Amino acid sequence: MTDLFAGLADIRPSREVMADGAVLLRGIFAATEADLIADLRAIVKQAPFRHMVTPSGHTMSVAMTNCGSKGWVTDIGGYRYDAIDPVSGQPWPAMPPSFGDLAQRAAEQGGFKGFAPQACLINRYVPGAKMSLHQDKDELDLGAPIVSVSLGLPATFLFGRLSRSDKPQKFRLEHGDIAVWGGPARLAFHGVAPLAEGEHPIMGRQRINLTFRKVM
Ligand code: MD3
Ligand code: FE
């Protein structure tokens, strides 16, 4: 019986409002966690994590890959969504139903019915990796939310407001946490503090974050 929820331990589904437009859902993927992680492993085999380079020439400490009909990429030429993985020259792996269904269900619980993301950016943090404060604005439809799913080691998520200079608020994001960012939160500055050392029982020495995006 206890095995049913192995990995999510005693987390019960919950819903918490972090800010106007930002909803944190906990424990909603308990039943589909094993499928999600198996599908993630298959994606990463086909499209391995890689460290991309920003337009300013910095190599990101977070390693990335994508699934879906579009993937987010950056290189010295800029940021964009592309149907082709530049490493393989092939389309990104398709978005599995375990991913798409979860994103849609989470968006609906966050107040956005009918969310159909084309892209899932997959971020991999090892201890020390971080993401500086930024806005996500490479998507054409800013009326659609972004749904994020955290797996593995816990992280300190930094949630700024609409100006880079506002002092960011800190939230702890743990394995199984799903957040829906829409409305006034959609263009908020946000980032992730350097990941602390640790070992997660299922995911090992890393944090993986999935972000689902309606690109067009
Ligand atoms: C708030 N990823 O990939 S997820 C990103 O944990 C990104 O890997 C972080 O920021 C991560 O762009 C944060 C939570 C998140 C994602 C997108 C947002 C929060 C957001 C977009 C707008 C506002
Ligand atoms: Fe972001």
Image (spheres, rainbow, N blue to C red):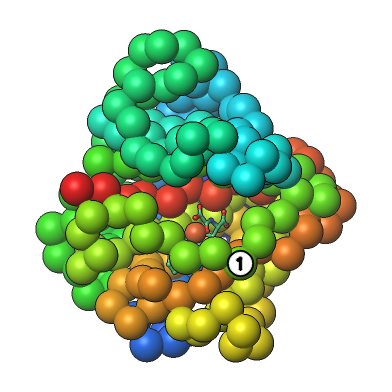
> Would residue 142 appear left or right of 187 to someone viewing this image?
left
Examine the image and state in which quarter residue 17 appears: bottom left
The image position of residue 112, as x and y in percent, is 20, 68
* Amino acid type assigned to the residue bearing label 1 in the image: Leu
Residue under circle 1?
Answer: 133
Name the residue at the top extreme. Answer: 89
Q: Nearer the viewer, residue 71 or 34?
A: 71
Pinpoint residue 138: horizontal percent, then vertical percent: 35, 53
**Residue 30 % position (x, y):** 45, 53
Taking the spot 45% from the left edge, 43% from the top edge, the residue there is 79
Q: How many marks?
A: 1
Residue 122 in sight from this viewpoint: yes
Q: Residue furthest right?
A: 197
In the picture provided, is 208 more to the left or to the right than 31? right
Viewer-nearest residue: 137 or 29: 137
Give x and y (percent) for residue 106: 31, 62
Question: Do we see residue 23 in this rendering?
Answer: no
Q: Residue at x 19, y 48 (%)?
A: 216
Position above or below: 126 against 158? above
Query: Which residue is found at the position 44% from the left and 86% from the top?
Result: 19
